[in-house]
Amino acid sequence: MSTSGSENHTNYLNDGYGVKSWLLTTDHKRIAILYMISITLFFMIGGFFALVIRLTLLSPNGTLVSADTYNKMFTMHGVTMIFFFLIPSIPAVLGNFLVPMMIGARDLAFPKLNLLSWYIYVLGGIFTLSAMVLGGVDTGWTFYTPLSSGYSHTNVVPTVIGVFIVGFSSILTGLNFIVTIHKMRAPGLTWFRLPLFIWAHYATSVIQVLGTPVIAVTLALVGFERITGVGIFDPNIGGDPILFQHLFWFYSHPAVYIMVLPSMGIVSEVVTCFSQRKLFGYRQMAFASMAIAVFGFLVWGHHMFVSGQSVYAGMAFSALSFLVAIPSAVKVFNWTATLYKGTIRFNTPMLYAFGFIGLFTIGGLTGIVLATLPVDVHVHDTYFVIAHFHYIMVGGAVMGYMAGLHFWWPKITGKLYPEGLAKFSALTLFVGFNLTFFPQFILGYLGMPRRYHIYPPEFQVLNVLSTAGASILGLGYIIPFFYFMWSLRKGKVAGNNPWNAKGLEWLTTSPPPTFNFDKTPVVTEEAYAYPEEDLVGG
Amino acid sequence: MFNIPFFPTEASTTASRIDLLFFALMGIIMLFTALIFVGVIFFSIRYRRGSRASRKGATSENLKLELAWTIIPLCITMGIFIWASKLYFDMHVPPKNAMDVYVVGKQWMWYIQHPEGNREINTLHVPLGKPVRLIMTSQDVIHDFFIPAFRVKQDVIPGRYTTEWFQATKLGEYHLFCAQYCGTGHAQMVGKVIVMQPWEYEQWLAGKSSGVTMSSSGEQLFTQFGCVTCHRSDNTGRGPTLVGLFGKKVLLQTGQTVVADMDYIRESILDPRAKVVATYQPIMPTFKSQIDQAQLMQLIEYVKSLGGSQSASKGNKK
């Protein structure tokens, strides 16, 4: 990553080559690269666990691994993917890189805090990884009590310490973004001229700052009960196991929006650029992001429709969950309307954005199914739920991340990746994803519970399909890894603005200089001010 | 009702109602998915770069359109909400004539007791066409009693009772799954539900019965643990009488009142000083380490047999 090939201008990549120049950097762009490397590592680890899960489920008898190993696999798959990949993915990598550039700033408001957040992330990662190396953890990523606080014999404490620590990195990133967006916008860049990517990160940051402390305290209490035996969640010693679920989902539902809101921001950037068109309904889109962040905090109880919470609480949470679906629907409609009378190009980022829109639509609408109380009773804790949230988190969040990575890769590295191969792998990913997760909707409605390593034989055909899909999906992730690496040395020089995109980040050189802009830009127009004239023939 | 491949059997009165709602939802989903997919594909082709389609009059603001696609989905979802809430509510109110069956979940098996005295493990026999209410608790972690063919599912929680009810409509054997992850043997905590003709069920009850009903087992425990020395039936003991207690309101020392339901009786056995009845002394010791969950249920069944408010014993406390 430290070579910049044929670039001859000074940029953040050739501004120092030593290890120290990376590990002690306060440049938001270099920190973004540090994050990118770390989360990719965790993605590979989490992906390995997924591989073991899918291979085990090829057979209804669970012959590949033992029950205990399988339980550890899905637990560690969830923990790594959620806390160490999805939550930091877009904010800490693309957000870190782009938030200052998009608002015309030299860096984030607190560059040292930004570096600290990466070190905290690494420290949390070390704890969680060591828990895995020491023998793993088998509570499920949801850490439900009293299983986690009293009954599990695995490494719960180091794992929750790891998650506790990594939460601070998330809080610091959120805090940094909020202050930066408030105080460091370029002259002329008013709130309603901000790109949607910034709005999305602002909304995300609010959730990170307000929500993360709750999960931190909750998991700390699990560890505390485990070590001291003081009854908090275990009813045998005077605790309340349902209390844990309330606290856990109070963060962990909004956490889904931490994952998907930044993706929505990316899709807004990509769709406008490759339609060469102003975003349809800009203000509604901005408000929708904030509405999702706010309403997202009021719907946690929809994870608990069969937990024994009161019928009336269930109804209230159901109604609120329907409400939170509306701003998401508004966003999908607005993206679609943006295409109308645009000048559409089908470059790789756009294919990923289409993928996002399609898969997020399915994920969101199946969320409506889950918000519907009686239907949720049937499909709760079955593969229907697994399919639904993978459509949101992989089909939505990861597709968005891939769209963003392909969109800004030329800016980040100054190099172009091979477009044909990239399109092919985007297609592979889309096909593989659907083949993996669509059968799981059917499995779920048939009644196959989640977290089963053995299952009745009538579910086998669909499970085999799903595993077959997963192998294609895996290929869809491996190909980009190689062509991105390849492009660093052999890729064509990108130029400042290869996509003819609007936005301040495209005004500066690729890769950008250490302080982003030679001269602070002055903003005189709204976001996505693509020419409205007839551009037939482009 | 439906005979679609890749679709689960409908074997309870609730199942067809849930499936109907589910199909309505699928219709809405397909409509909206089609709308978006067709929109995206059509616009992408028509307005691809190089196409000659007119771009005149392109706009990026249309308040009426924004309002329409906010309000229409809102109305649709609120309609679903009302339909769903009604059904959800019904699913939590068992019919008055429901027969009770007691379930204890523990790592990793289901222990089931019928009031008639029959006990079974990982198998539940029920009669066709009769509402059955399951009264469930867990001895350790949270479990979940899930019967896909009946479309019922309810977490089984340590430290309290939860209930679920169903009325089977189709003879046969159906899957019983633990749906809440509960540790190593979670996937083995499965069994079957066997729906029989009512007369077959009666035969089964008679044939497999130990001859001792749950309430008489409870009565034996009541004597064995010495409960009877204080909780005398003539109300002259050091503890309040339990005759006619079940489902009645009880005045506590603190001046509050509490309904003597299953959870209250259970709590009073395990943690007697938590809610002491007015005018009595907190002298009862805990029986926490001596009585297991299955025995607690027998004691409760015995207390129920001493009479009380019938509606409270059937009505769901939720």
Image (cartoon, rainbow, N blue to C red):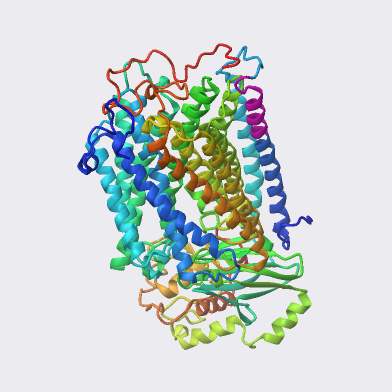
Height in image: B120 above or below A332?
A: below
Height in image: A97 above or below B262?
A: above
Q: Main secondary structure of the magenta part?
A: helix
Tag count: 0
Question: Is residue A231 in view from this perspective?
Answer: no
The answer to which of A180 and B190 lies nearer the viewer is A180
The answer to which of A453 and B305 lies nearer the viewer is A453
Residue A196, magenta (yes or no): no
Q: Residue at x 59, y 64 (%)?
A: A58
Q: Residue at x 43, y 77 (%)?
A: B239
Residue A425, image x, y percentages:
54, 42
Q: Is residue A35 left or right of residue B99?
A: left
The answer to which of A182 and A76 lies nearer the viewer is A76
Height in image: A284 above or below A352?
A: above
Q: Is residue A6 left or right of residue B250?
A: left
Question: Is residue B267 in view from this perspective?
Answer: yes
Residue A171, image x, y percentages:
32, 42
Question: Which range of residues does the magenta coloring cover?
Answer: B35-50
Residue A349, image x, y percentages:
50, 33
Residue A63, image x, y percentages:
55, 71
The answer to which of A28 and A393 lies nearer the viewer is A28
Height in image: A273 above or below A77?
A: above
Residue B49, magenta (yes or no): yes
Task: Say which quarter of the image contains residue B257.
Answer: bottom left
Q: Quadrant of the N terminus of chain B?
A: bottom right
Q: Quadrant of the C terminus of chain B?
A: bottom right
Q: Residue at x 54, y 65 (%)?
A: A56
Q: Is residue B132 left or right of residue A154?
A: right
